[in-house]
Image: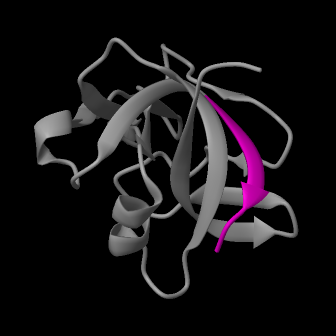
Amino acid sequence: MLGKIGYKVVKRKSKNVFMPCTSMALQKIKYKIGHETVQKEDDYGAFAVFENYEDARTFASSDDNILLVRYIKSNEDILWKKNPPIFRRGYGNSYYAESNGITERHITDCPKGTVLAKLVYPIEIIK
């Protein structure tokens, strides 16, 4: 089995599908029990994972879930995601999307016990 054991704080989307618990993460990312979620390096950075359950529990709100995961550690030290594009008026009635930059958060600004992972494999729901 791959990587280390960790804990991912998430919100439930459906029975076995979960999404990030904070708006700092790109909300289109989905975690599914028994399936890998891999970083898309052109779209968003690494995933935040907790090394121990106590830190995950301290961070989680009452309506969050905590998943037991296996993960592969990232070499990155910044969480990042592309911001939603800005739509500009083109010629006539047309519009086009323009980059709105990226949002970043350094690992030192993350909660205690956070590590960054390039791959997350949810095993089961802990809470």
The span shown in magenta is: 120-127
Evaluate whether residue 78 shows in this view.
Answer: yes
Residue 45 found in image quarter: top left
Q: Nearer the viewer, residue 121 or 3?
A: 3
Q: Nearer the viewer, residue 26 or 55?
A: 55
Q: How many marks?
A: 0
Which of the colour schemes (rainbow, by chain, secondary structure, one colour) is used?
one colour
* Vertical comparison of 50 with 37: above or below: below
Instruction: Please give the name of the residue rendered at 43% of the width and 71% of the height, measured from the top-left corner.
Output: 57
Residue 20 in the figure: left or right of residue 123: left
Q: Is residue 122 magenta?
A: yes
* Vertical comparison of 49 with 4: above or below: below
The location of residue 40, given as percent across then percent down, is: 57, 19
Instruction: Please give the name of the residue rendered at 38% of the width and 31% of the height, measured from the top-left corner.
Output: 116
Q: Nearer the viewer, residue 3 or 11?
A: 3
On-image quarter of the C terminus: bottom right
Q: Main secondary structure of the magenta part?
A: strand
Q: Nearer the viewer, residue 105 or 60?
A: 60
